[in-house]
Image (cartoon, helix red, strand yellow):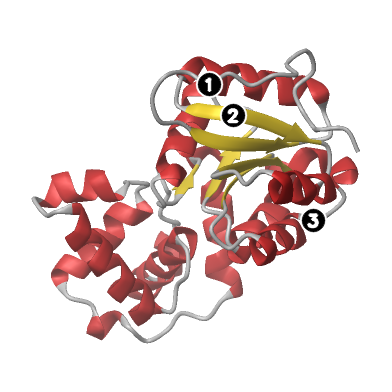
Amino acid sequence: MERASVEGSPEWHGPAGPALGVLVVSGISLLREGAYALLRRSGRYWPIRSADTVEQALMEIAREPVDLLLMDLSSRASVGATGGSACRNLLTAWPTLRIVILSSPWLQDEALDGIRAGALGCVSRNSPAEVLLTAMDTVARGEHFFDPSITQAIVSRLAQSAPAPAAEARLSSLDLQILHLIAAGQTNRQIAAALSLSESTVRTYNTRIFRTIGASTRAEAAAFLTRMARRQSGPPQERPYPLG
């Protein structure tokens, strides 16, 4: 099989300084080329390779591991797997891989499956380029990033589909402050600055909060907050917490 690459770029010469390798998975060549150009201009990601399908992505990573993977759900017919199954296959083979999903409003179920399977980021295809770069930068640090334009609907689905655990009594006032900031889409760095804490302290709190409320992702944590608000305010005031 020929090496997967962005058309017209057979050789990879990275910029000076450390950079993170990225693999773009999409069956749409125009999207692959656009993502390549955007990430290349940032100067933070190199090499940047691409693949048409999840199967090809697995072969590419086996040949040369990457740090991040950007997966387009909208081309799922050519990518060859649903969001959840694709993420599970990739993370089973490469547990340290960090995945950002490119999704669309009509693919919320697949995006949710991908998040549950371990994707750290989810961005709408209609978002500005700066949002995608922010998502890549955030996920590169091992943090979650969910695009506000699509995650409110995802959080609402989570809030409706999963029962709310009786964990509020075990959350301190600081836990709740951090939980609200997580639901507002704040990164660990932003939360640390807002609360005058170190990032390591915020990460420790996050781990404990997630364990207490039974959440594994930030979207699930935001859904927990939504369910808690519904129980406290009643049906007339039902309104999900956005992630941004």
Q: Foreground residue, 211 or 49?
A: 49
Whether label 2 touches label 1, CB < 8 Å = yes
Whether residue 102 is visible, yes or no, is: no
Residue 42 position within the rendered picture, expressed as x and y whole percent measured from the top left: 47, 19
Q: Position of residue 235 (x, y in %)?
A: 45, 68
Q: Nearer the viewer, mark 3 or mark 1?
A: 1
Assign a secondary structure to mark 1. loop
Relative to 1, is 40 on the left or the right? left
Give the quarter of the image for residue 13: top right
The image shows residue 183 at horizontal and vertical percentages of: 37, 55
Q: Amino acid at mark 3?
A: Thr
Vertical side of 30 occupied by 178: above or below = below
* Gap in angstroms between the C-alphas marked 2 and 1: 6 Å
Q: Earlier in the sequence, mark 2 or mark 3?
A: 2
- Distance, label 2 to label 3, CA atoms, is 26 Å
Q: Which residue is mark 2?
A: 47
Q: Are marks 3 and 1 in contact (CB under 8 Å)?
A: no
Q: Are marks 2 and 3 in contact (CB under 8 Å)?
A: no
First in residue order: circle 3 vs circle 1: 1
The answer to which image quadrant residue 2 occupies is: top right
Q: Which residue is mark 3?
A: 82
For residue 14, the mark is 1
- Please tell me which residue lies in front, 142 or 117: 142
Residue 4 in sight in this render: yes
* Residue sitting at x 40%, y 71%: 234
Q: Earlier in the sequence, mark 2 or mark 1?
A: 1
Front residue of this view, candidates 151 and 139 = 139
Q: Secondary structure at mark 2?
A: strand
